Image (tube, rainbow, N blue to C red):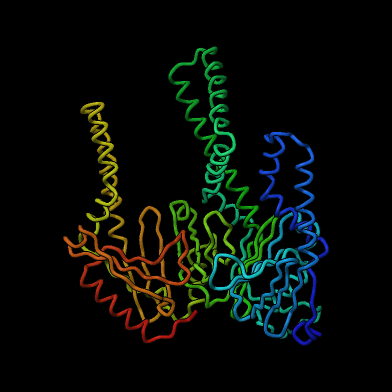
Amino acid sequence: MTPADAAPSERRLHPWSWLFVLLQQLRQFIIPIVAAFFFGGDRNELWPLIGVGVLTLTSVLQYLTYRYTVGRDGLSIRSGWLHRQRREIPYARIHNVSVNQTVLHRMFGVAELRLDSAGGEKPEATMRVLRMDDALALERLIRHRGATVEATADGEAPAANVLLAMSPGEVMRLGFISNRGLLVLLGGYAASVQFAPRLAENLFESWAKSMFGWAESHHFGVQEYAIAGATLVLALLAFMRLLSLVLALLQYYGFVLSEDGPRLTVERGLLARSRNSASKRRLQAWTLQEGVLHRLFKRRSLQVDTAGGQTREGQTPRALRELAPIATPAQCDALIEHLLPEAGWPSLEWQRLHPKSAIRIFLANAWFPTLVVIALCWRFGWIGLIALAWPAWTWFVARHHAQRAGYAVNAEIVAVRTGWWSRQWRFAEIDKLQALRIATGPLDRRWGMATLWLDTAGAGAMTGPLRIAHLPEAEARALCDRLARMVAARKLRW
């Protein structure tokens, strides 16, 4: 008898659930506890133990008072001891399902299940923790909105259609292309500044003194110093790439994008495993990216903005976001054609921007190089004119940006193409558009330009809404009116 057919009965979480809740709370309160121990006035050694005891008691009470019921149409969750609450979550309102496993979760054979709706920055429910098979069974039940899932001969659910599977070689390419190593180093430096402001500075000073002292004892000349500096830079770049490779393996090893009816599921991770699921109709906007290293390896990346996937700054994204962290252009195009069969992606007719868009892009990016040239000329005289190469490069880049940029509109999607050094395509289905607006600045009005903004439900903080910049004003207003009529005549597909 399946959960959908059985009479609803209350269930508890895994017996070790309180331990994982305790560890989660310790992560939040460990700094105050340590600070109270080392910097407290009375230096009472019992205070940290009392704090841990209170957190342990709270975790056990949370486990004992947490109940959930799997019904035919939704989940019912009851929690709380003094302040009690009950939540009714219909399956149809659950848009994103995440099953996450850390290394500790895998050791205990459990997983954390998070359920998200279209609105709100917090999950509708976080079930910490369930047995892995119970979490997967509940995920399947939610994915099929409470319908019975036919089992195969071995008792497992039917296998989903695999759309993309990344081999270890592809994961290594992703690590080499990405700059995650640099981000980790910057994050580590920022953390050291918060907790030990002079730690990084002291380490650098100590290292520099020892290195220069050793170099002076060997009587190195200018050439040796130059070689040593170049070697140091190369070693730092190699270390960052190695760190990026390790992070890519940890995060994306075993990456599989699969399709099961109306939902897409991404599973990935080497030590910690995550499994994110979302309905295909929740995909709001698409981003296809191609950097310099991407072109060197003949690869691209495909990301999506999902309704309900917004998170606060600093939080880990819960919603499905990356359909193809790295793939060949043919694989990316095949994914787009499969998931948007009526969009006509390969046959889009791209339109150019305003003839003076290159000048507009240059002026928007040339003010800082110009200030640098003026400052260098004031400080060093005519030698500072060498810095004019920077504004010249800015103009070169602006021209190529303007030549490549464009937009395309058909009966199904609106797309924007930007970039030259690093290229990007952003597009969305017209049925997913929610608002349109036209913006013009002082220079835009002088040259007859305008920017058209297209808002969707899933525009995240990193990607933002779609934007067609530097259009002829009359063309922008005509396009806005055309899209407004199309949006008004169609039903919003949420």
Q: Position of residue 369 (x, y in %)?
A: 28, 41
Residue found 43% across the figure and 19% down from its top: 222
Q: Quick one: 418 or 201, which is closer to the camera?
A: 201
Quadrant position of residue 131? bottom right
Residue occupying the far left of the picture: 446
Name the quadrant of the N terminus.
bottom right
**In the rendered image of this protein, does residue 84 appear above or below residue 6?**
above
Q: Is residue 144 left or right of residue 389?
A: right
Give left or right: position of 458 versus 473: right
Q: Nearer the viewer, residue 355 or 133?
A: 133
Nearest to the observer: residue 68 or residue 424? 68
Place of residue 360 in the rendered image (x, y in percent of width and height, measured from the top left): 24, 56
Q: Residue at x 71, y 79 (%)?
A: 158
Where's residue 248, x and y in %?
Answer: 60, 52
Q: Is residue 493 above or below residue 449?
A: below
Residue 120, quarter of picture: bottom right
Question: What x and y, as percent, mark residue 383?
Answer: 24, 28
